[in-house]
Amino acid sequence: MKTLLVTSVLPWPLRKNGGGQRSALLKKALERFGPVDVFAVGGSALKENTPEFDSLLPSQNVIDCIVRNCPVNDIPAWGFGPFKQLARTIRQYQFNYEPDPTVQDRLQRVLEQHGPYDLIVGRYLQPVIQSGADRIKDIPKLLDFDDIDWQTLKSSIREKPWPGLGGKIGASLLLSRVKQACEKSLDRFDHVFVTSEEDRTLLDRPSTVLPNIPFADNESVRIDALEADPASRRILFVGDLQFPPNREGLDRFLSRIWPEVIKQVPDATVDIVGRGLTPERADRWEKIQGTNVVGFADELVSFYKRCAFNIVPVYFGGGTKIKVLESLAYGRTVVACSHAMRGYGCLTETDPAVAVAESDEDFIHACIRLLTDPGLRQAMAERGKRIVEQVFSFNRFASIVADHVPQEAIR
């Protein structure tokens, strides 16, 4: 079976973030059936604009990689003043849900030069719509929906409402149009994967939960637990700081939660690890007592090894938060807000493996308790590790993919 993977996020190690990890895992699962070619289309974050980066693309069978930017200044808009800006914002979103003739031509050339393909798999919906891959006939198609687009947008607007009556009307209009565009495309797939049971209930069609799982950059796709340090007073934050939910969630933690924690546990520290750290933000965060602002790190093992637990203060956005599972796989429990635990109900049933905070006060109390009770945090981490190994393994991930590959695609 020869597969074409259409994606807006290149697989790890080309993109070292959660999206890149899932792309790599999906590609690896499909490679159990045969070769997988990658057709990538996305915005400016799709790839680095360097010859060195381009030279790495063949290592992941990337046969075309198209950066597609919305021409903001060229977007015609009705109205005046703030209404014109609102119209442009709506138009920018719509741009991502429209077929692009240039991208369609590039995909057609790929099909002619590298095909025939037995299966097309979409990784996210936007690149599929832009390339017209969902409209190709006579080839079975699967979709890894991952983030439910309209749910992600709704979550973002709820956290940061668009101002005024015009903003409310515009947001409602945009949500309706995004959902309509997505549902029209979804009808063209043989099957759809989502990342959580909560997301599955949002669709009015058959779909299957393909969970996010911890990722290791090795053949086993397995992470070994690290020995815990009972004396540790280090908290760890890991996240892509170019991603607004991570960046703004960390801002909230440092301004509203951390000052109260440091009052009760004066020797506590928090390591801040993640790419996309700007000099302005680094300078601001470094002035806060107890912070160790690292930014991008080539490896995470040393940070997990010395931390007491991990925090996930992510209050909006879609999908599931892989950093929760990654931390448990390394043998470290987690304090997370309730939004960040979406899809992970098995970690909070009966004896919780993580601490879920419904408010800033809950977050403060959980951090203090785990910093001062190493036995509790170790017991929680051990429960979490067992659940991750049972429920979120690569073999289970790959078997779910295999179960839904159409028989007509298998030679």
Image: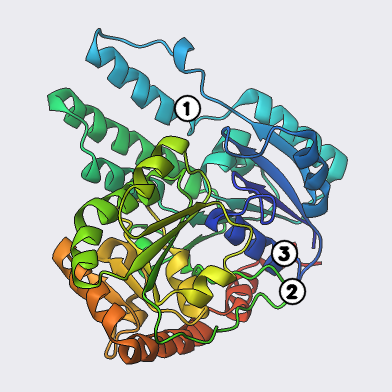
| Residue tagged 3 | 408
Amino acid carrying label 3: it is Glu
Closer to the eye: label 3 or 2: 2
Among the two numbered marks 3 and 2 on one chain, the one whose residue lies closer to the N terminus = 2
Inspect this view and state whether residue 234 appears.
yes
| Residue tagged 2 | 219
Query: In which quadrant will I find the C terminus?
Result: bottom right
Residue 155, horizontal then vertical, whole percent: 28, 48
| Residue tagged 1 | 95
Q: CA distance from mark 3 to mark 2?
A: 29 Å
Amino acid carrying label 1: it is Phe
Q: Please give left or right for residue 271 compared with residue 299 in the image.
A: left
Crowding around mark 1 (Cα neighbors within 10 Å: few <14, some 14 to 19, many 20+) is some
Residue 345, horizontal then vertical, whole percent: 32, 77
Q: Quadrant of residue 112?
A: top right
Label 3 with label 2: CB-CB less than 8 Å: no
Label 1 SS = helix
Closer to the eye: label 3 or 1: 1
Label 3 SS = helix
Q: CA distance from mark 2 to mark 1?
A: 38 Å
**Closer to us: 402 or 283:** 283
Question: Which residue: 17% across, 61% down?
Answer: 360
Among the two numbered marks 2 and 1 on one chain, the one whose residue lies closer to the N terminus = 1
Residue 333, horizontal then vertical, whole percent: 39, 79
